[in-house]
Image: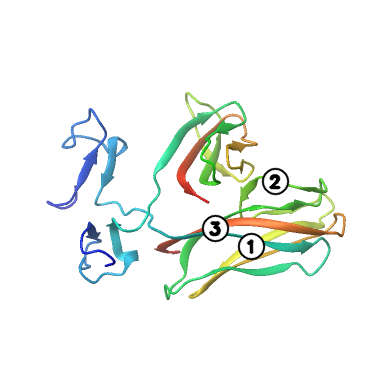
Amino acid sequence: MNNNYGVKISKPGVDVVNAGLKDLYFHSNYPLLKIYDIVSGSTSLTDGGAGFNVQVTQHSLGYEPKAELWAAYYDPFLNTEISEYELMPLTERSSGGVIGMFYTVSKDLSEIRFLGETYGGDSASHTINYYCVVYYDEDL
Amino acid sequence: MEYDYGIKISKPGYSAHNAEKKDLIILSQDDAHKVLYKGFVTSGSYTHNLNKRPVFYCFTTDSTTSPTYFSLTKLARSSTTQIVNIPNPSYLVIMREGI
């Protein structure tokens, strides 16, 4: 340990005094990612339209927190609504250079927003489902 | 504190008494990730049966025995029972937390 004090918890069968990091359940020199909130929701998307800009969640942290978002989206190339959830953001372009999907996550001092749009699909309306994990840590 | 018991450890230079949560190493009253599974996957899917969609990370690699790189992939997808569409081979990390 860097300091002469702290807390270490080792895995069963491992001596905490000599254990390497991989054999520790906890080491107080290494911060845990503390979870502020886990939220889920949905929004609608019209392929070829203006896209969406939805507020995923508000927070009162006063700084830009680390956050991760998974979404079940509409794939215009396959013309399919993907039922499972992928880690965002996701950007794909067709071989012709046309934007197919473009998703970004924006964060600031009080809210997290999810932006997205698709082109080249069926021009129909689709439901976009998502879940988002917000951490107390700053997104440095 | 919501309760008058628990564990708080602050980062160096901060007081555990009044530090913001972001400046704490651990706060026992808030959740943190707990690992459900970590390991190589070569079958294209992994059944977690959590009955919720978990936080997960999938890294493609070139070998399960002597890997030379790990690259975060966004191809893998979650459902309430499985992680699917996992490139072969990959290194998968699934947390117990999700929704």
Marks 3/2: CA distance? 16 Å
Extreme-left residue of the structure: A4
Picture layout, residue A57 above or below residue B65: below
The N terminus of chain B, quarter of image: bottom left
- Mark 2 neighbour class, 10 Å CA radius: few under 14, some 14 to 19, many 20 or more: some
**Amino acid on which disc 1 is placed:** Thr
The secondary element bearing badge 1 is classed as strand
Q: Which chain carries label 1?
A: A
Residue B96 is situated, as x and y percent measured from the top left of the image, at: 45, 44
Q: Mark 3 lies on which chain?
A: A
Extreme-right residue of the structure: A122
Disc 3 vs disc 2: Cβ atoms closer than 8 Å?
no
Going 48% across and 41% down the picture, which residue do you hit? B94
| Callout in the foreground (3, 1) | 3
**Amino acid on which disc 2 is placed:** Ser
The secondary element bearing badge 3 is classed as strand
**Amino acid on which disc 3 is placed:** Cys
- Mark 1 neighbour class, 10 Å CA radius: few under 14, some 14 to 19, many 20 or more: some
Residue B38 is situated, as x and y percent measured from the top left of the image, at: 45, 35
Q: Along the polypeptide, which appears first: circle 3 or circle 1?
A: 1
Picture layout, residue B52 above or below residue A51: above
Q: Pointer 1: what residue?
A: A104
Q: Tell me the tag on residue A132.
A: 3
The secondary element bearing badge 2 is classed as loop
Marks 3/1: CA distance? 13 Å
Marks 2/1: CA distance? 19 Å
Q: Tell me the tag on residue A83.
A: 2
Q: Which chain carries label 2?
A: A
The reply to whether label 2 and label 1 mark residues of one chain is yes
Q: Which of B95 and B62 is in front in this view?
A: B95
